Amino acid sequence: MLIIGSHISFSKGYEDMGKQAVELGANTFAFFTRNPRGGSIKALDVKDAKRFVEFAKENNFGKIVAHAPYTMNPCAQKEELRKFAKEAMAEDLSRMENIPGNYYNFHPGSHVGQGEKIGIEYIAELLNEVLKSDQSTTVLLETMAGKGTEIGKSFEQIQQILEKVELQDKIGVCMDTCHIWDAGYDIVEDLDGVLKQFDEIIGLYRLKAVHLNDSMNVRGSKKDRHAKIGEGMIGKETLVSVINHPLLKGLPFILETPNEIEGWKKEIKMLKEEYKEK
Ligand code: FE
Ligand code: FE
Ligand code: ZN
């Protein structure tokens, strides 16, 4: 079964997000754990989280992929910003235990001129402080486009972070198709080759989720501007190959395409139709 969904806004709570996902024809979704640009957090409704867990079971949901706010920079230069990132992630992860066993995705961050090495060090340090051996959530590092001083633009950089993490069974990777394309990986001409590289450098067992996006820019542009499926430089054919790839079977595919409800409904319907093994 194809596990597919889109971003949903966390306005009314978990159960409401689940219902919205079903309305879209989805069986997973992503949501921001807190205001994506600011960082403020909603009060937690434990009963709502419980109702959602039941709802997700009844509706055969795959794992959902929570997203940390953009403003969180785990490898910022200013100590107070790194402290915010650490505290926000710790609080988010403790909340995630109310909807156990799902994924929490974050952007590794931007080293802002301190250099990759220091950036990678800070990110690993943060993970080693925040991850707990008894948590049920797997934390995912997102592959990035390489805009500015972003860390995570190559599989090597992601691996360098991963190998410094002590609790190895609590971490994984979320691969964003727009980002790896913008970073230079040629998934249009050689999807197999890119996945082979991922496997050799990181290990495909680490890949837990995919952000399925087309890109407005050419390969290697380092831009990170998402396009609707089939309306960008990656194209529908490649993105359909992604959801059907034997090595990616069973992963949750999350659309972060520039759409509203109707657009996501259409994309989800189209991708379900293009999915080979029903
Ligand atoms: Fe992201
Ligand atoms: Fe993404
Ligand atoms: Zn992006």
Image (spheres, rainbow, N blue to C red):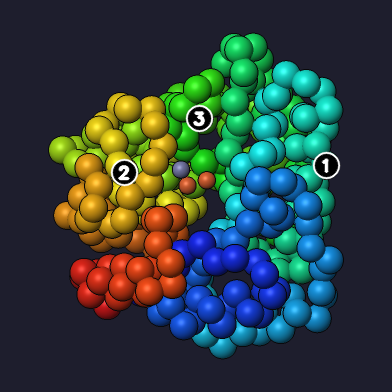
> Does the beta carbon of the residue at mark 3 sit less than 8 Å from ligand 1?
no
On the rendered image, what quadrant is the C terminus found in? Answer: bottom left
Q: Left or right of 275: which side holds 5?
A: right
| Location of mark 1 (residue) | 87
Taking the image as drawn, is residue 19 in sight? yes
* Spot occupied by residue 207 in the image (x, y as percentages of width and height): 46, 47
* Spot occupied by residue 173 in the image (x, y as percentages of width and height): 51, 43
Residue 275 in which image quadrant: bottom left
The amino acid type found where label 2 is placed reads Ser
User: For the residue labelled by badge 2, is the local secondary structure a helix, a strand or a loop?
Assistant: strand
The span from disc 2 to disc 1 (Cα, nearest Å) is: 33 Å
Label 2 packing within 10 angstroms: few (<14), some (14-19), many (20+)? many
Assess whether mark 1 and mark 2 are in contact (beta carbons under 8 angstroms). no
User: For the residue labelled by badge 3, is the local secondary structure a helix, a strand or a loop?
Assistant: loop
> Residue at position x 58%, y 78% from top?
18
> Residue at position x 55%, y 66% from top?
8
On the rendered image, what quadrant is the N terminus found in? Answer: bottom left
- Considering depth in this image, is 271 or 190 the residue closer to the camera? 271
| Location of mark 2 (residue) | 215
The amino acid type found where label 3 is placed reads Gly
- Considering depth in this image, is 111 or 148 the residue closer to the camera? 148
* Spot occupied by residue 192 in the image (x, y as percentages of width and height): 23, 42
**Marks 2, 3: nearer the viewer:** 2
* Spot occupied by residue 251 in the image (x, y as percentages of width and height): 42, 60
> Residue at position x 39%, y 31% from top?
223
**Marks 2, 1: nearer the viewer:** 2
> Does the beta carbon of the residue at mark 2 sit less than 8 Å from ligand 3?
no
| Location of mark 3 (residue) | 152
The span from disc 2 to disc 3 (Cα, nearest Å) is: 18 Å
Q: Left or right of 76: which side holds 91?
A: right
